[in-house]
Amino acid sequence: MAPTQHPFHDGELLRLELQIAKRADTLWLAAGQGGGSDLMHWLKAENEVLGQYLGSEAVGAGEL
């Protein structure tokens, strides 16, 4: 059985997670630093960052 290919390069997953955390923090600060909405901020940040990442990956792959 062949090993499963991971869709991310070395360190890329950590870089994305850090970008998501930074964006979630920015959203939290902009919302007034209230409690109880951390998951909402994280999911919104995750959607934005991964959307940008996947969009750039799609463009990059088409240029080959």
Image (cartoon, helix red, strand yellow):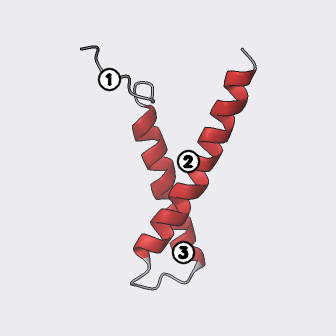
Give, as a three-letter code, the residue at label 1.
Thr
Residue sitting at the far left: 1
Residue 30 lies, in percent from the top left, at 60, 76
Q: Counting other residues with Cα less than 10 Å from the Cα at mark 1, is it few (<14), some (14-19), or many (20 or more)?
A: few
Which one is closest to the eye, mark 1 or mark 2? 1
Q: Is residue 52 above or below residue 24?
A: above
What residue appears at the point 54 percent right and 60 percent down from the top-left corner?
Answer: 45
The residue singled out by tag 2 in the image is 50
What residue appears at the point 46 percent right and 39 percent down from the top-left corner?
Answer: 15
Q: Counting other residues with Cα less than 10 Å from the Cα at mark 2, is it few (<14), some (14-19), or many (20 or more)?
A: some
Give, as a three-letter code, the residue at label 3.
Leu
What residue appears at the point 68 percent right and 35 percent down from the top-left corner?
Answer: 56
Q: Is residue 47 above or below residue 52?
A: below
Label 2 to label 3, Cα distance in Å? 21 Å
Residue 55 lies, in percent from the top left, at 67, 40
Q: Quadrant of the C terminus?
A: top right
Label 1 to label 3, Cα distance in Å? 39 Å
Q: Secondary structure at mark 2?
A: helix
Q: Secondary structure at mark 3?
A: helix
Q: Secondary structure at mark 1?
A: loop
> Residue 39's quadrant in the figure?
bottom left
Label ID, residue 22: none
The residue singled out by tag 3 in the image is 29
